[in-house]
Image (spheres, helix red, strand yellow):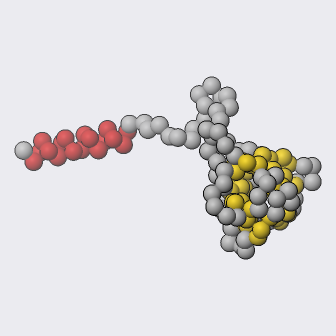
Amino acid sequence: MKFTAFTTATLLAVLGVGTPVSVLAQPSPTGSYVPGYWQPEAQVSLGRPITVRILNQTGIPLEYGLSGVDVYTLGSNASADVGVNLSNRPGNTATIAINAQRGTYALRYEYNVTDNNVLQVRVIPGGGPQPLDRAVYIDETGRVYSF
């Protein structure tokens, strides 16, 4: 009886380890673009200073701030620059939260990178079926994501 239970447990363990598992973030089998939050929205150069320019086009005041630093207010139809210092060391990332100053308000970010490494983040009212944006994330390779 013990031998049968041991054999069954061993077989289940071996089969469980050897069975392939589908992973959420994997390349498309066709090599084509598959939209989703895991896709970068823009790319900045890590070899040069990075400026993130927030353009508030929501019609309401916003709060913004680099993670671990103070929170600032950005008036309607105003802009603000945030300096970001990154290198390509693993784990060296930057997160800038951008939210409505009061209450919950749906926001959407649109990105543009200029020749002098300025990441322009146009903040507009959100809506529709797509997830809403709450933060700009720059990874250690310079890829820019919305979360």
Can residue 52 be spotted in the picture? no
* Residue 92, placed above or below residue 19: below
- Considering every residue shown, the one lying at the far bottom of the view is 70
Q: Residue at x 21, y 45 (%)?
A: 9
Q: Residue at x 18, y 42 (%)?
A: 7
How many dots with numbers?
A: 0
Instruction: Indicate the quadrant where residue 12 lies.
Output: top left
User: In the depicted view, which residue is nearer to us: 43 or 12?
Assistant: 43
* Residue 123, placed above or below residue 86: above
- Considering every residue shown, the one lying at the far right of the view is 116
* 82 lies left or right of 97: right
Can residue 27 be spotted in the picture? yes
Q: Residue 60, image x and y in percent?
A: 76, 58
* Residue 105, placed above or below residue 68: above
Q: Residue 86, image x and y in percent?
A: 77, 63
Q: Residue 73, image x and y in percent?
A: 77, 68
Instruction: Indicate the quadrant where residue 105 lies.
Output: bottom right
Q: Residue 97, image x and y in percent?
A: 69, 61
Q: Residue at x 66, y 50 (%)?
A: 106
* 40 lies left or right of 51: left
Instruction: Name the image quarter holding the N terminus.
Output: top left
- Considering every residue shown, the one lying at the far top of the view is 30
* 143 lies left or right of 8: right
Instruction: Indicate the quadrant where residue 19 lies.
Output: top left
User: In the depicted view, which residue is nearer to us: 5 or 58?
Assistant: 58
